[in-house]
């Protein structure tokens, strides 16, 4: 028997601020059922033109997603991470979207990172080995720097 699921803390968003997070959750639900290669391709397409998200912007998007979706507040890490990335994109920025595993005991996980570390996660950076990542696109001015 597994341990009870801990839910993320949930704030209530005002009604006028719920539309974009709800849309992101809905699109993420559709994407989460697709093959990993398809998810990656869609996210790589959507990230174009967005600047890198700060940890604060990413945390705010994650809070908004969790506030409108009980599923995303629980163990639906794939849907939550995709929705967070999509909401960030709707706000003009892009975090690094990641999926990965740990081996002892085996567990798969999906999360978002900004400014070099995971955002809103109870585990430190490196707890999961990253298998897929969709980082922000570097602008031509910052390539090679």
Image: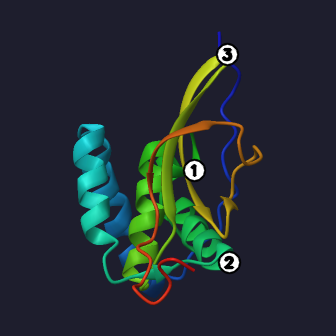
Of all residues shown, which one is farthest toward the front? 144
Q: Quadrant of residue 7?
A: top right
Q: Position of residue 19 (x, y in %)?
A: 36, 77
Q: Tell me if label 3 and label 2 are in contact, CB under 8 Å.
A: no
Residue placed under numbered mark 3 in the picture: 105
Residue at left offset 57%, top offset 65%: 62
Q: Which residue is mark 1?
A: 73
Q: Is residue 68 left or right of residue 22?
A: right
Distance in Å between CA atoms under marks 3 and 1: 23 Å
Sequence order check: which comes first, mark 2 or mark 1?
2
Which residue sits at x=39%, y=82%? 50
**Which numbered dot is residue 18?**
none
Secondary structure at badge 1 equals: helix
Determine the secondary structure under disc 3: loop
Q: What secondary structure is marked by label 2?
A: helix
Q: Are marks 3 and 1 in contact (CB under 8 Å)?
A: no
Alpha-carbon distance for marks 2 and 1?
18 Å
Residue 78 at x, y percent in the picture = 45, 44
- Please say if 48 is above or below 134: below
Residue 118 pos. (x, y %): 67, 56
Mark 2 Cα within 10 Å, few/some/many (few <14, many 20+)?
few
Q: Is residue 55 above or below residue 129?
A: below
Q: Quadrant of the N terminus?
A: top right
- Report the mark closest to the observer, 3 or 1: 3
Residue 24 in the figure: left or right of residue 136: left
**Residue picked out by circle 2:** 56
């Amino acid at each position: 028997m597994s341990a009870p699921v801990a839910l993320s803390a949930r704030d209530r968003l005002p009604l006028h601020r719920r539309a974009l997070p709800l849309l992101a959750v809905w699109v993420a639900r559709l994407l989460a059922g697709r093959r990993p290669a398809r998810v990656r391709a869609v996210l790589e397409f959507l990230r174009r033109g967005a600047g890198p998200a700060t940890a604060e912007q990413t945390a705010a998007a994650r809070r908004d997603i969790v506030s409108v979706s009980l599923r995303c507040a629980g163990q639906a890490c794939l849907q939550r991470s995709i929705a967070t990335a999509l909401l960030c994109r709707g706000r003009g920025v892009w975090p690094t979207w990641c999926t990965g595993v740990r081996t002892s005991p085996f567990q798969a996980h999906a999360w978002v990172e900004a400014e070099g570390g995971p955002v809103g996660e109870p585990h430190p950076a490196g707890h999961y080995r990253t298998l897929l990542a969709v980082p922000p696109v570097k602008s031509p001015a910052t390539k090679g720097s």
